[in-house]
Every structure is written in C-alpha cells, then in structure tokens.
Image: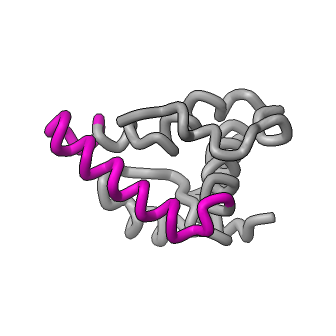
Amino acid sequence: MPIVIISPLITKMLSIVISVSAITLYPFIFLSGEANEYEMNHELIHYEQQKELYIVGFYFLYVYDYAKGMLKYKNKEFAYYQIRFEREAHAYDRDLGYIADREKYSWKKYEV
C-alpha cells in the first residue's frame, strides 16, 4: 500500500504543468488535503501503473506522452489529459471496483 502524505505545500510545488490536489510518486501519494474516494481511486490507479512499469518506465512514458501531446496539440493542459496513464485513471476513477478487476497494462489501449 502507498504511503499517504497530506501536504498542500508539496502538491503546490509539484503542480508544474497544471494545478493538482494530489500526485502519486511511488511509493507516496501526496494530497493537498483530505481526498474523496474518487480522487484516492485515481491516485491508486497511478500507483498500480507505476508498480507494473517499475517506476522508471512509468516516468519515461509519462514524459514521452506529455512531450508528444505538446508537439501534437500545442496546449499544455490538453497534452496532460492525453497522457495514456491519465486517460486510464480519469476513465475509471469513479469505478471503485476497478483496481480489484484491473488487468495489468490496461493503459496500453490509450494513445496520445
């Protein structure tokens, strides 16, 4: 299980591309305050993605997807939402049973 840390300062410092209220940096989930069940589910999906790509692979693909999105869309916020990991997490963050049934590498069906 991840280590959850509530720190508005850390989430603000890590809001490089867009303002975020939570961010997962394996093995931590940083929150700006109390998270609801859907926000936590979103971050737990990222936690699983990071585990299956041995952390480094996740960050490599995350940056690659963002750079590809920036070149393609020329909009930092839209590029962020097109990252394959964000697309999976946003698609299923309201499905609280998703993680239990999630197939590994489910993010692969998304393209930037």
Residue at (51%, 70%) from the top-left corner?
Answer: 56
Q: Is residue 87 above or below residue 17?
A: above
**Image-based side of 1 in relation to 59, left or right:** right
Residue at 56% across / 36% down in the picture? 88
- The image position of residue 69, as x and y in percent, is 26, 41
Write the start and end of the magenta stretch as one range: 52-78
Dividing the picture into quarters, in which one does residue 47 lie?
bottom right
Give the main secondary structure of the magenta stretch. Answer: helix
Question: Between residues 2 and 53, which one lies in front from this camera angle?
Answer: 53
Q: Is residue 70 above or below residue 4?
A: above
Name the quarter where the N terminus is drawn: bottom right
The magenta stretch spans residue 70:
yes
Residue 43 among those drawn in magenta: no
Is residue 77 shown above or below 5?
A: above
Residue 95 position within the rendered picture, expressed as x and y whole percent measured from the top left: 74, 28
Viewer-side residue, 95 vs 60 = 60
Spot occupied by residue 49 in the image (x, y as percentages of width and height): 62, 53
Residue at image x 64%, y 45%? 105
Residue in front for this viewpoint, 38 or 52:
52
Q: Look at 75% across and 39% down and name the residue there.
A: 103
